Each structure stands twice: as C-alpha cells, then as structure tokens.
C-alpha cells in the first residue's frame, strides 16, 4: 500500500531552497517517490516550471491539464465532489503566509497537504488571483487525431474552462 508523502523541502528561498509541494503532489498521484520527480532549487517562471514538469510527464506518456478558477475554494471542492468524486488532482492557491502552495485532492476532499509546516493550508487564490486545479492524464491517445485533440482544447480554452498545452 502506497503511503502519501510530505514534501522533501520547505520553501526557504532566502537559503536557496525552493519548496517542492507541487512535485510531491504529482509523485503522490503517480504513487512514486517524490525524489523521482524533477525539482530545481531555483526561482522559475510558471512557464519554465511547466516546461520542466511537462517534459518529465511526457517521458511517462502523460501530460498535465490546468484549470484556473476565479471562485472560492469551497465552490471548487464542491464541483469536484459532485462531478468527479474519485478523481485525483492538485489544487493550488496561497497560504496564510502568502506562499503559493499545492495540495492533493480527491473529489471534494483535500486528501494530502504535503507541507512540512503544520499551519500551511490554502486560504486564498494564488498570486494570479485564481485557484488552479491540475490533472495528470495520458497523452493524446493514438486513435484520436491531433486535429480533434487540438479542436477540443481550443473550444475548452475559448470557453475559459481549460488551459492545455500538449507536449
């Protein structure tokens, strides 16, 4: 039986240490050691971090899908409880300390907060004023054409539902 892990590093940029909550959530979803998922102790833009993580996930035949939610956390958890009660995903926002942070959810429940700090719960949207949910899913199946895949992604993006970047 897989035991969910805590992150390996506290977020201490003044000491050259960047927290690894998001990669720990990915490791918990994949049921692998967090140390097997890439992590860099450097400040990275969202695009750089996504490129690093997407490269790793692509090596496993996976991609990440991220949704931005300008809604309260209770709304987001309620939607997932009602529509996807057994789906694992990463919920990202900001803690009381003002640090962007990620936790692992299943349906409408925060299943694992990987923080090493006992009082590090999500309380507000992330620095971009949105909560985010990230799903780790298989890459485009070979029986779905690239164009169909792109068309679906465009329609979701147009409707403000989804941000998807296939690798």
Image (cartoon, rainbow, N blue to C red):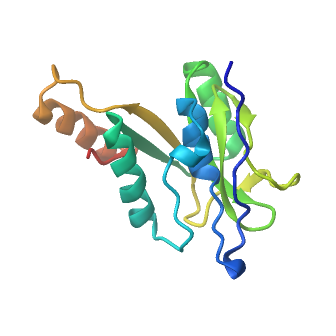
On-image quarter of the N terminus:
top right
Residue at 24%, 43% (x, y): give it: 154
Q: Residue furthest right?
A: 118
- Looking at the image, how many numbered discs can be counted on the residues? 0
Query: Which residue is nearer to you in this view: 100 or 152?
Result: 100
Residue at 80%, 67% (x, y): give it: 97
Q: Is residue 161 left or right of residue 69?
A: left
In the displayed structure, 62 sits above or below 67; it is above
Q: Quadrant of residue 4?
A: top right
In the rendered image, residue 39, in percent from the top left (x then y), is placed at 52, 58
In the rendered image, residue 113, in percent from the top left (x then y), is placed at 74, 43
Q: Quadrant of residue 103?
A: top right
Query: Which residue is nearer to you in this view: 27 or 149?
Result: 27
Q: Is residue 121 left or right of residue 56?
A: right
In the rendered image, residue 133, in percent from the top left (x then y), is placed at 54, 43
Q: Residue furthest bottom?
A: 14
Q: Is residue 110 left or right of residue 126?
A: right
Can residue 90 be seen here? The reply is no
Can residue 119 be seen here? The reply is yes
In the displayed structure, 136 sits above or below 37; it is above
Q: Is residue 33 left or right of residue 162?
A: right
Residue at 51%, 47% (x, y): give it: 37
In the displayed structure, 115 sits above or below 110; it is below
């Amino acid at each position: 039986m897989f035991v969910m892990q805590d992150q390996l590093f506290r977020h201490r940029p003044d000491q050259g240490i960047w927290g690894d909550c998001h990669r720990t959530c990915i490791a918990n979803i994949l049921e692998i050691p967090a140390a097997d998922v890439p992590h860099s102790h450097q400040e990275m833009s969202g695009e750089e971090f996504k490129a690093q993580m997407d490269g790793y996930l692509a090596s496993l035949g996976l991609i990440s899908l991220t949704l931005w939610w300008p809604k309260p956390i209770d709304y987001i958890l309620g939607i997932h409880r009602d529509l996807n009660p057994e789906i694992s995903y990463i919920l990202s926002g900001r803690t009381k300390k003002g640090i962007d942070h990620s936790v692992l959810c299943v349906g409408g429940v925060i299943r694992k907060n990987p923080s090493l700090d006992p009082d590090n719960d999500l309380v507000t949207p992330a620095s971009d004023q949105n909560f985010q949910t990230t799903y780790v899913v298989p890459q485009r199946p070979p029986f779905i054409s690239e164009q169909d895949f792109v068309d679906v992604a465009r329609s979701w993006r147009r409707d403000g539902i989804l941000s998807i970047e296939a690798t």
